[in-house]
Image (cartoon, rainbow, N blue to C red):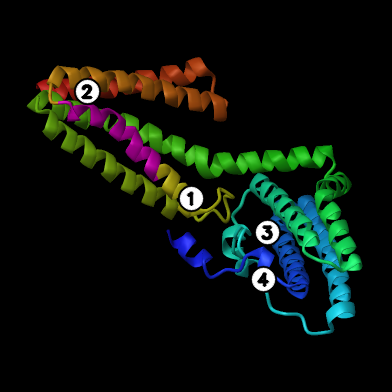
Amino acid sequence: MFVRLFSRFKRPLSSLSEQEVLALAISSEEDDGRIYQAYAQALKGRYPDSAKVFEDMAEVENTHKNMLIDMHRRRFGERIPLIRREHVNGFLARRPDWLRQNLSLDAIRREAEAMETQAYNFYVEAAKRTSDASTRQLLGELALAEQGHEDVARMLTDKHVPEGVRRKEDDTAYRQFLLTYVQPGLAGLMDGSVSTLAPIFAAAFATQDTWQTFLVGLSASVGAGISMGFTEAAHDDGKLSGRGSPLKRGLSCGIMTALGGLGHALPYLIPHFWTATIMAGIIVFFELWAIAFIQNKYMETPFLRAAFQVVIGGSLVLAAGVLIGNA
């Protein structure tokens, strides 16, 4: 709703004069060059070779900008109208610098591809709206250049990031993904799934009241999620360990902890006690096997060993809850 409201105050591309089209092209090339420089700066610490690729791509954008400025100077003089992408309908919003800093390497590559595709589409449309032969030729050449940026990026990547370096950077990115998301999330899922078994099933068998059991499960899950999330975020800022943003780790751990407990608490919304309990037991089985699967897939723990540890441990906690509830 708000996007549609504010888009009414933007100009359609068809309403721009030839001078404004050139001015928009100049500002767009300048912005893209700055974005590539920001990518390079963000990647320089962890992926110095990929950073060089984006530095070279920024130089290409700067060359395009200078070509467009020369054309504007010949046709319209020195004063360039102030018009940017956010003033015109149809352009995708660019991320601000503070959001771009935390993008993964693959996300940066995908965003760069999207930028080049949009630039190509803009130059094709802009070329249709100019009657000056030299300007139309320049815009057409820039459209071809943007279309060929995938080849330029590949060439620059081959120059700065040979296969061995690319594999090393991808391994580093994957390791960062494991440390920032998978490891905290797995710890939270294990804690939420296993630690809440005893209080939920103890409450279930002690009261045989499904609503009261659900409230116990809900409070235990949410409380454990908040506690685990704050603990994960507070105990390590990620600077020395390299485990990444404490906020991301805390959210990953906290959310997965809460979900792990809620999985077998939600069946107690069913009013029939034994139906709810059987459903909760089935969900616990799948939760524990899911934990074993994640450990095997991402943490390289042998599946049988992971299954033995998780299933046996969870079964013991479940049995303890049932015994306490029947005491």
State yes or no: residue 109 in magenta: no
Q: Quadrant of residue 125?
A: bottom right
> Residue lying farthest front?
131
Q: Nearer the viewer, mark 2 or mark 3?
A: 3
**Does 107 sit above or below residue 24?**
above
The residue beneath circle 4 is: 84
Q: Quadrant of residue 199?
A: top left
Q: Quadrant of residue 216?
A: top left
Among numbered discs 4 and 1, the one appearing first in the sequence:
4
Q: Nearer the viewer, mark 4 or mark 3?
A: 4
Among numbered discs 1 and 3, the one appearing first in the sequence:
3
Specify few, some or many for label 3: CA neighbours under 10 Å numbering under 14, 14-19, or 20 or more: many
The residue beneath circle 2 is: 320
Q: CA distance from mark 1 to mark 2?
A: 34 Å
User: Which residue sits at x=70%, y=48%?
Assistant: 109
Decide if residue 96 is in sight here: yes
The residue beneath circle 3 is: 42
The residue beneath circle 1 is: 248
User: Which residue sits at x=44%, y=18%?
Assistant: 307
Q: Nearer the viewer, mark 1 or mark 2?
A: 1
Q: CA distance from mark 1 to mark 3?
A: 18 Å
State yes or no: residue 269 in magenta: yes
User: Which residue sits at x=32%, y=48%?
Assistant: 226
Q: Nearer the viewer, mark 4 or mark 2?
A: 4
Q: CA distance from mark 4 to mark 1?
A: 33 Å
Among numbered discs 4 and 2, the one appearing first in the sequence:
4
Q: Amino acid at mark 3?
A: Ala
